[in-house]
Amino acid sequence: MSGCRFLILRRGAGAWSRLGTHFGGQGHYEGQAFIAGYSQATTNIHRSSHLIRNGSVKFHQMSTATSVNLPPAKVGKAASEDEKRDFMTLLPDIVRDLADIDSNSDIPEAQKWYAKVLQYNLVGGKMNRGLAVSLAFKLLASPDQITRENIRRAHILGWCIELLQSFFLVADDIMDGSEMRRGKPAWHCKDSLGTSAFNDAILLEAGVYKLLQKHFRDMPYYTDILELFHEMTMRTALGQTLDLLSCPPGKRPLLSKFTMHQYNAIVKYKTAYYSFYLPIALSMYMAGITDRELHRQARTILVEMGQFFQVQDDYLDCFGDPSVTGKVGTDIEEGKCTWLSVVALQRASPSQRQIMEEHYGRPEPESIAKVRDLYKELGLPATYRAYEDSTSSMIRIHIQQISRGLNHNVFFKFLEKIHRRSS
């Protein structure tokens, strides 16, 4: 895509930023064009013109005289080592705030256990969600707002997201029966905790609201961020519900539900909202940005990135290196509704679909190998690579078209972190 520039048009509408709910809230555009539109192996973004049928969206190559200058895709770390160190330095305070290990309590055993839960489950990940709050705040806030105390508050909000993430992961691993998480045993597998670990997931979620009350109840944006966390938790739980409905626990996956529409909905609700929109929305509220239109624009582009991220995650689960990703892929044996499985079913001949019917969602190594071989036979690795590069390029275009009321670098920082990632 390097060197190509495109004008984005929509029938009967103006600029992209005016697409409103067609691009944002209703799902008529987001994910459909970016995922379904690139499920064909012949997709080629370098063609002089390309029509994506969903939503009648057209991409026409422009002359350089009237085009938008696009920054190159970058591959690197969104946060520096110093920023990560500053963030991690706060963890002992977070544990102390939540477990009250220095207080005179009549439940010391429970408090020590809570501290153990926190120390095991809050570390080991990349912490991109948590780090994103302070990074975005520094780009969005005015100079007088960027104080040591406000950076500390941004880090605390980042740890709130990490708590929420840990709550989701512990619960998800229990439901899926996953044995590994972040390169170590999943919490419910440690010391044979089993389903009793779900109480620890509840403790992790409760920690979010204790920290918010302790550190933000006197802030003017307290109600905004409190409501935001509740909303993101609800949306994520609804996404998990859709995921479970497509593959009920203990039963064979319902391949009839494996449509691109269903997949997009799962991804949007289960991953994109809390992983991508939540960190930036929190930083916007901290910076005093409460305008609903700016939040809508941010949500639109960040949900789009979240869908991009999940397609990558699906690919890495099947074809990634466990020593790099930190977990052994289980999507095939668990019968998950993934981008790979949906595109495979779209392309499969009757005999190939029969392979999916017989082997998808089975734990035997032979079945997993047959499905993985079918993905290769259908050319999905090549399709994914085309999708990744093309989608990254289109997201960069859309970032340029966001209102000038938002610092575009916030979104480019996110994109450079996920483009061509390997874990």
Image (tube, rainbow, N blue to C red):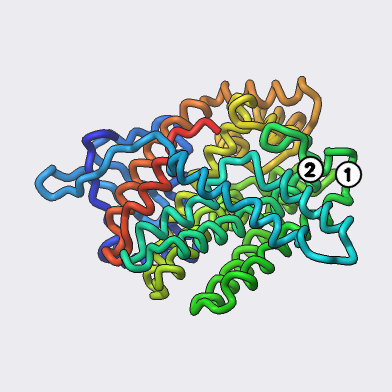
* Tag 1: amino acid: Leu
Image quadrant where residue 240 sits = bottom right
Q: Is residue 340 above or below residue 287?
A: above
Q: Residue at x 60, y 67 (%)?
A: 229
Q: Which residue is mark 1?
A: 193
Q: Nearer the viewer, residue 342 or 234?
A: 234
Q: Nearer the viewer, residue 345 or 273?
A: 273
Mark 2 crowd level (few <14, some 14–19, many ≥20, 10 Å Cα): many
Q: Position of residue 46 (x, y in %)?
A: 28, 34
Q: Residue at x 61, y 41 (%)?
A: 125
Q: Is residue 184 above or below residue 268?
A: above
Q: Which residue is mark 2?
A: 187
Quadrant of the frame with the N terminus = top left
Horizontally, residue 365 falls left or right of residue 399, namely right
Residue 398 is marked as: none
**Which badge, 1 or 2, is on the more N-terminal residue?**
2
Q: Is residue 376 above or below residue 120?
A: above
* Tag 2: amino acid: Trp
Q: Nearer the viewer, residue 292 or 136?
A: 136
